[in-house]
Amino acid sequence: MKNEMTVSQILDETDTGKEYSSLLTDIKTVPMILDQKQNTISFPPIINSSLTSVSTKTRNLLVEVTGNEFEAVADTLAVIGITLQGLGFTLYDIKTDSRSSADSLKDRIISLEPNLVNQTLGIMLSAENICKMLKKCRLDATIKSKKILCKIPSYRFDILGPMDLVEEVALGYGIQNISTTLPPSTSIGQKSQTTQKLDELTQIMIGLGYTEALNSSLTNRQTLYDNTKRDPSKLIEVVESKSQEHTVLRDSILPGLLENLSTNIHESYPQKLFETGIIFTNDSPIKESISLACVSAHKESAYTEIKSILQSLLKTDANIECQTKTSTDPMLAKGKTADILVNGKKVGIIGEIDPQVIDNFKIRVPVSGFELVLSEFIV
């Protein structure tokens, strides 16, 4: 634009303002960067002033990075600054309040143990040779008291610790130059008895016409408790989870299978799914168990069908006889729910999924299923 505009006009009338105005929602005052003559040169994070337009005649640049995380801003400034310096520009420091832009360009020092390099890579390099490998990767390194002090440029914010330097040594040495060796163990690797048993159960379920699913042990409160009407009082939640969707450790596999059915309502029926995996019990310490669950979804799905699958699974695998005893469970329909007993001990639940739960997951057909805690009697 060639004419002056107010903040409101920029946000309401320009394409850039309309696109990014959501970044300033509920903010009473907006940031502005002014020059010495009080001319506006930037309205971050929306738009820059025409005063800052760059042409082939431009000789002086102000590099300004705006963000809400100082480390991210400093790292970005370092990359841009070093890049411009490489193009022939001379960098000048700018001080704002108590900070200096030069702080973003300061080198860091990381200490590296030669033994860590050799043990990790399986090679024998002296400290002098490790320094040479690091210098090949444009990292200055010196030896001090049997340790290697490596100077990390500001733009290499991908290097967080000693193990990252081990990777740089490997690159300097040449990955292709690292010879392969056999492990020192004389034993031959093989599947554990637990894994073998799970493989057998998997093959039986596939033979019975079920498709294996694989869900994460981390799920969310809505899937695990809200939609299934289960009691969340023993919920196990991850502290400071990086994911907003997966924050809770599952204590049952059935809710995840119902979520699978919910996301596949456009597919043809019947849909028959099963999964084996780890579930977690809120104890001290937290207890891990291996569980197997399955669901059958179609218009004639019922208790008798899913019980026959349960009996076939246990009979075929280990000739185990099970009994069922009428019980209740918030996830299963009243009067069509039972505990699974082996040698008089409860090892799971079976029944038809409650209509309200089916509706919560937006599934369009009846569903029946069971869940066995295999750790209680098989693996």
Image (cartoon, rainbow, N blue to C red):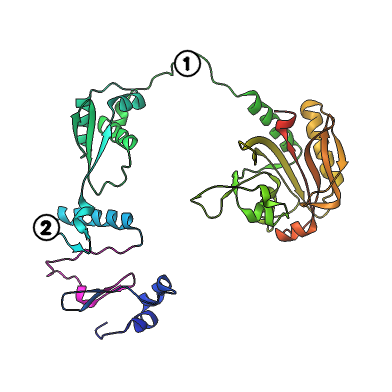
* Tag 2 near tag 1, CB within 8 Å: no
From the image, tell me which residue sits under label 2. 90
Q: Give amino acid for label 1.
A: Ser
Q: Is residue 67 left or right of residue 257?
A: left
Range of residues picked out in magenta: 42-67
Residue sitting at x 55%, y 47%:
238
Q: Earlier in the sequence, mark 2 or mark 1?
A: 2
From the image, tell me which residue sits under label 1. 185
Q: Secondary structure at mark 2?
A: loop
Q: Quadrant of the C terminus?
A: top right
Residue sitting at x 44%, y 19%:
183
Q: Give amino acid for label 2.
A: Thr
- Residue 154 lies, in percent from the top left, at 24, 48
- Residue 284 lies, in percent from the top left, at 62, 37
Give 379 or 71, whichever is nearer the viewer: 71
Residue 62 drawn in magenta: yes
Residue 357 drawn in magenta: no
In the picture shown, does residue 19 fall above or below 156? below
- Residue 135, by quadrant, is top left
Residue sitting at x 76%, y 28%:
317
In the picture shown, does residue 290 fall above or below 243? above
- Residue 372 lies, in percent from the top left, at 74, 38
